[in-house]
Image (cartoon, helix red, strand yellow):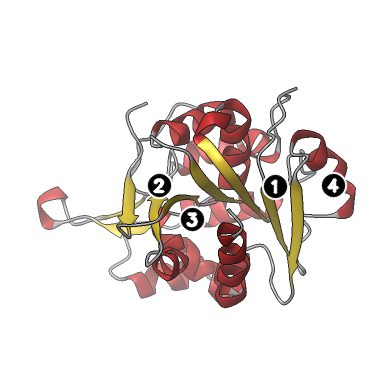
Amino acid sequence: MTGLHTTTLGEQGSPVVFCHGLFGQGKNWTQIGKALSASHRVTLVDMPDHGQSPWTERLDYEAMADAVAGVIDEPVTLVGHSMGGKAAMLAALRHPEKVERLVVVDVSPVEYRSAEEFKGFIDGMLGIDLGAIESRGDADAALAEAVPDAGIRGFLLQSLRRETAADGGGWRWLPNLEMLRRDLPVLRGFPETDAVYEGPVLWIGGSDSGYVRDEFAPAMEARFPRVRRVTVKGAGHWVHSEQPKVFTEVLSRFLDDA
């Protein structure tokens, strides 16, 4: 895989690297990144098969983790949400010399029972006839039945891009949807490993989400013994977008403890 696409914010301070979740892009972290950029050098990563980064043949968390490590040239605070959180955990386990501190956002190092919600999103996205839509509003209307939640629908539509006239002017999805749908069972899981990461870890969950639960704590603590768990009230799975101010405060305190 060639290198991942990244965006940088800030010119001074310790480095912080952000990894987004399924269907996302590095720019999903822009609000948080800008809030930190006065005192940190921030890198927003487009994960494999997303945004402007290359597509791959299959979903592979180890390869994803290694690709993230490939954009890191000094010890960083690595922040990852959902799919990006699993990749960030693996990057810390496989490349601990590159990860000074780790922040895991609303995901656990376990295999989840179902990915039906994500499958429904993908089916809805693939079900849109991109040749028939003339505007983003048309796409929103076409996706409404499969994804009734306007907030989630808006998030998904951020990954719909209109090509330039030179490229035909049509619409295309940035994520590698066909492959992601096929490999959703891999997405649900977490690779077996005996590695242990000894650095400090902040584990942030949303109070209204089921991705970080007490029953998952033993798996987290076995691999990340220096973990500290924080639950953000009034937030679901997309903690950083639903409660950005609280999330930024929690993250800033963790960074300032360095």
Mark 2 nearby-residue class (10 Å; few <14, some 14–19, many ≥20): many
Q: Is residue 128 visible?
A: yes
Q: CA distance from mark 2 to mark 4?
A: 29 Å
Crowdedness of circle 4 by 10 Å Cα count: few (<14), some, many (20+)? Answer: some
State the residue position of label 1.
115
Crowd around label 1: few <14 · some 14–19 · many ≥20 (10 Å): few
Q: State the separation of the CA atoms marked 4 and 3.
A: 34 Å
Kindly identify which residue carries mark 2.
Answer: 46
Mark closer to the observer (1, 3): 1
Label 3, on which residue? 125
Please report the residue visible at 59 percent of the width from the left and 35 percent of the height from the top: 92
Q: Which residue is mark 4?
A: 217
Q: Is residue 146 visible?
A: no
Q: In the image, which is nearer the foreground, mark 2 or mark 4?
A: 4
Residue at 52% of width from left, 68% of height from top? Answer: 153
| Dot placed on the residue nearer the N-terminal end, 1 or 3 | 1
